[in-house]
Image (cartoon, rainbow, N blue to C red):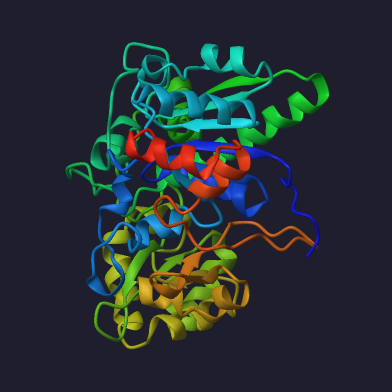
C-alpha cells in the first residue's frame, strides 16, 4: 500500500456524537494518527446508544460509535483532573491539529482554548465545530435532530404545501459539515506548510447547511420570495414525483425535463395521446395539471416494480430511480462494487459492514481499522508517546487522572 496522504500528521479528537467524530475519521482513513480523548466520567454519547450488536449493550458494542470512529486510537483522559489536564497539554505539544465539538466556552474554561494551545505549540491548528459558531448572539445555542434542522431552515422546506415543517430523515447536516470541516483542516495544514503558521477555525453547522441552500436564499435576497414547501414536486419540471409501484411499500422517483423526454416518456407508458392532450401538451400546462397527471402515471407504475420502471425510463433518457430502503442500499450491486461499504473486523462485535469514505484517490488504499475499545490506546498514548512508566500510568489511573 502506498503512503497515505496524511501520514505523519497527528490529530487530537475532543469530539463526540456525529459531526466531530466523522470529521476526524475522514482524516484517519487518509493516514492521520487520530487520538480520541475520552473519559469514563462522561463517555461519548454514541457509546451509550443503540444500535448494539445482537442487542447486547456495552460501550464497545455500539454500531453508531463504531461506524464513526474507526481507524482511530483512543485514550481515557480526565481533563477535569489537574494531572489529566497536564497530560492533555503534553499531547497538544506533540500534535498538529486539535478538533473539538464541546459547548461554547467549555474548552476555554478547561484551559484548552486556542490561545492556551498556541502558547504550548505556536503552529497548532484548532477547529471548533458547533451548531451556530463561536460568535454572534446565538453562539451558545445547543441542538440535536429537529432543533438543528429547524435552526438551519431546512425543515421549513421539507414538507407539503400547507403542512407543518418536517424533520428530514437522518442528520445529514452533521455529515456534510464533517466533510466541510475536514476540508477546512486540510486548507489550514496547507497554509501551515507554506507559512509555518497555525490557525483557528470556527466552523458552524448552520453556516455550512445554508451554503447548500443557495437557490432559496438568493430567491429571497433578489426577488423577495420566501420558498414554500412543495413536497416531491419541482418549481419547473413536471411530472416530478415519487410513484407507488408493484409490491409492499415500493416506490419510484421520476423527473421529466423538456419536450424530448416528455415524448419518450409518453411512448414508454403507452400513451402517445398525452402529447396532444391540452392539459399536458406544454411544460407549463403539465406543471399546472400535476394533480390530474400523477394518478395516470401511477396507474402504470403500480403494475411494475421500481426496477422495471427505472430500466424502462432510463433506457430512453428519462431520469428515474427506485426509492431504496436501507436493506436495498446495503445489498445494491452498484454500491457493493464501488466499495461504498467496508467490512471491518471489530474485536468485540466481529465483522460488520460500515459506510466507507465518499471519495476515491487513484493509487491510495484508505485505512479501515476497527473503532478503538474504550481506553485501548492508553499504553501507546501515555507510555510510548508521552514516555510515562507503567508505574506512573498506574498511579495516575488510581488518582483517576487517566480514567
* Rendered position, 143 above or below 40: above
User: Residue 193 appears in which quarter of the rendering?
Assistant: top right
Residue 323 horizontal side relative to residue 231, left or right: right
The N terminus: image quadrant: bottom right
State left or right for residue 299 relative to residue 286.
left
Q: Is residue 402 visible?
A: no
Relative placement, left or right, of 394 versus 169 is: right
Residue 25: give x, y in percent of width and height: 54, 49
Q: Nearer the viewer, residue 61 or 400?
A: 400
> At x 33% / y 61%, what residue is drawn?
62
83 with respect to 25 (left or right): left
Question: Where residue 33 appears, x then y in whole percent?
Answer: 63, 46
Q: Is 163 or 344 nearer to us in this picture?
A: 344
Residue at position x 42%, y 25% from top? 83
Between 368 and 213, the one nearer to me in the picture: 368
Q: Position of residue 208 (x, y in %)?
A: 48, 33
x, y (%) of residue 340? Answer: 56, 68
User: Which quarter shows the C terminus?
Assistant: top left
Q: Number of callouts in the render?
A: 0
Amino acid at each position: 500500500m502506498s503512503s497515505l496522504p496524511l501520514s505523519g500528521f497527528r490529530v487530537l479528537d475532543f469530539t463526540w456524537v456525529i459531526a466531530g467524530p466523522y470529521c476526524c475519521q475522514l482524516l484517519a482513513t487518509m493516514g492521520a494518527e487520530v487520538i480520541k480523548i475520552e473519559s469514563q466520567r462522561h463517555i461519548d454519547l454514541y457509546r451509550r446508544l443503540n444500535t448494539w450488536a445482537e442487542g447486547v449493550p456495552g460501550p464497545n458494542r455500539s454500531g453508531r460509535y463504531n461506524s464513526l470512529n474507526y481507524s482511530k486510537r483512543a485514550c481515557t483522559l480526565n481533563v477535569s483532573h489537574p494531572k489529566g489536564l497536564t497530560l492533555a497539554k503534553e499531547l497538544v505539544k506533540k500534535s498538529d491539529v486539535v478538533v473539538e465539538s464541546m459547548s461554547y466556552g467549555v474548552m476555554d474554561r478547561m484551559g484548552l482554548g486556542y490561545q492556551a494551545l498556541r502558547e504550548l505549540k505556536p503552529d497548532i491548528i484548532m477547529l471548533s465545530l458547533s451548531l451556530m459558531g463561536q460568535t454572534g448572539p446565538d453562539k451558545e445555542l445547543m441542538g440535536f435532530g429537529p432543533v438543528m434542522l429547524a435552526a438551519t431552515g431546512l425543515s421549513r422546506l421539507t414538507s407539503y404545501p400547507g403542512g407543518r415543517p418536517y424533520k428530514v430523515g437522518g442528520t445529514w447536516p452533521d455529515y456534510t459539515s464533517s466533510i466541510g470541516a475536514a476540508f477546512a483542516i486540510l486548507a489550514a495544514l496547507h497554509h501551515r506548510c507554506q507559512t509555518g503558521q497555525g490557525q483557528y477555525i470556527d466552523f458552524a453547522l448552520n453556516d455550512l447547511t445554508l451554503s447548500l441552500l443557495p437557490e432559496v436564499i438568493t430567491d429571497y435576497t433578489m426577488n423577495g420570495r420566501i420558498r414554500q414547501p412543495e413536497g416531491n414536486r419541482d418549481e419547473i419540471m413536471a411530472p416530478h414525483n415519487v410513484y407507488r409501484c408493484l409490491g409492499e411499500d415500493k416506490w419510484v422517483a421520476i423527473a421529466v425535463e423538456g419536450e424530448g423526454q416528455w415524448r419518450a416518456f409518453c411512448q414508454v407508458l403507452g400513451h402517445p395521446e398525452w402529447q396532444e392532450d391540452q392539459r399536458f401538451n406544454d411544460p407549463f400546462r403539465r406543471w399546472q395539471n400535476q394533480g390530474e397527471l400523477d394518478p395516470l402515471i401511477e396507474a402504470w407504475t403500480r403494475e411494475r416494480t421500481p426496477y422495471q420502471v427505472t430500466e424502462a425510463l432510463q433506457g430512453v433518457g428519462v431520469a428515474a430511480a427506485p426509492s431504496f430502503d436501507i436493506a436495498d442500499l446495503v445489498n445494491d450491486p452498484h454500491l457493493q462494487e464501488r466499495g461504498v461499504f467496508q467490512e471491518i473486523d471489530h474485536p468485540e462485535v466481529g465483522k460488520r459492514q460500515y459506510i466507507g469514505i465518499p471519495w476515491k484517490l487513484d493509487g491510495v488504499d484508505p485505512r479501515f481499522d476497527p473503532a478503538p475499545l474504550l481506553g485501548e490506546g492508553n499504553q501507546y498514548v501515555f507510555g510510548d508517546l508521552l514516555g510515562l512508566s507503567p508505574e506512573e500510568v498506574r498511579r495516575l489511573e488510581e488518582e483517576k487522572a487517566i480514567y
